[in-house]
Amino acid sequence: MRFRIYWLLLGCLYLSCQTTASVPSTTQEVQDRTITAKVKGFSKYEGYFDYYWDAKAGKIWLEIARLDEEFLYVNSLPAGVGSNDIGLDRGQLGDERIVKFVRVGPKVLLVQPNYDYRAYTDNMDEVKAVEDAFAMAVQEGFKVEAEEDGRVLVDITNFLLRDAHGVIGTLKRTKQGSYKLSKERSAIYLDRTKNFPKNSEFEATITFTGQPAGSYIRSVAADPQTVTVRMHHSFIQLPDDDYKPREFDPRGGYFGISYYDYATPIGQP
């Protein structure tokens, strides 16, 4: 009986030591998952969205403190192909989207609501019905790499190094050849990657490789088998809504914004 009690006490003591020893390790793991620990040694750019530059890995880490807050995302082409016939000109503006970062568990999604179809009404069921009836767009998904005080950190490098401007499709549509993105020859262009209080700016050198088939690309590219451009990405704070939209008048000389309002009574425009 004494031996049983002895071994039982010894076992409890062993388990107690194991539990005590594991606490520092767990605490260290939690500390290692903080943003402060993750970005140690990186260059910080403060602004609308704070971000960090990892010079060794060539990566951009975005700190998101504004989850579920809409902003304007615009992409453009600051350095183009050089042929008017192809249509990929220097300074060309790309798509303009209203987007927001939404966290879902271990992921952060870049969501673009569908504002082509709306319902201006106090009836929230009607608003929800229109939202569910027409597809939104998830532009990108990111893994949460670290978090701290309600802020999350994600790696947006691959998002910046994609064909955001649709160069591949344009070259194919204009019969200039079949190209693909070369990530090995693409990188962040740090000279034009900057941060400001109301907008965060990112730029990347993007290279496409393939077999040229048209005369336009052959006449302007240094090597028509390797076409390199630069793409710019802007995250811009939206203005306030303290204004009243004016009904479109063709005499105004401006482009109109059109959408379908499903809350408008039948018989009214």
Image: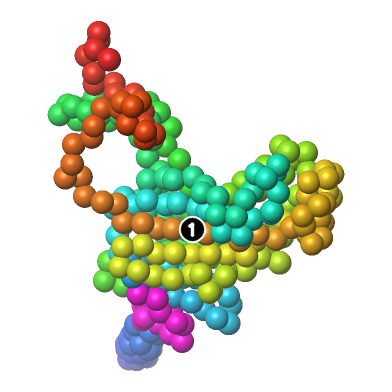
Left or right: residue 226 compared with residue 255: right
Q: Position of residue 54 (x, y in %)?
A: 52, 78
Quarter the N terminus occupies: bottom left
Q: For the view shown, which residue lies furthest in the top direction?
A: 267
- Which contiguous range is marked in magenta? 30-46
Whether residue 225 appears in magenta in the rendering, the answer is no
Amino acid at pointer 1: His
Q: Position of residue 128 (x, y in %)?
A: 27, 30
As drawn, 178 above or below 19? above
Q: Nearer the viewer, residue 79 or 129?
A: 79
Q: Which residue shows up at 73% across the image and 38% down it?
A: 174
Q: Nearer the viewer, residue 53 or 193?
A: 193
Whether residue 37 appears in magenta in the rendering, the answer is yes
Q: Position of residue 127 (x, y in %)?
A: 25, 29
Q: Is any atom of residue 9 visible in this view?
A: yes
**Display coloring:** rainbow
**Residue wearing tag 1:** 233
As drawn, 154 above or below 167? below
Q: Which residue shows up at 42% across the image and 67% down it?
A: 62
Q: Nearer the viewer, residue 7 or 3?
A: 7
Left or right: residue 156 compared with residue 184: left
Q: Nearer the viewer, residue 83 or 193?
A: 83
Q: Which residue shows up at 35% across the image and 25% down it?
A: 250
Q: Is any atom of residue 26 visible in this view?
A: no
Label 1 packing within 10 angstroms: few (<14), some (14-19), many (20+): many
Quarter the C terminus occupies: top left
Q: Position of residue 148 (x, y in %)?
A: 31, 72
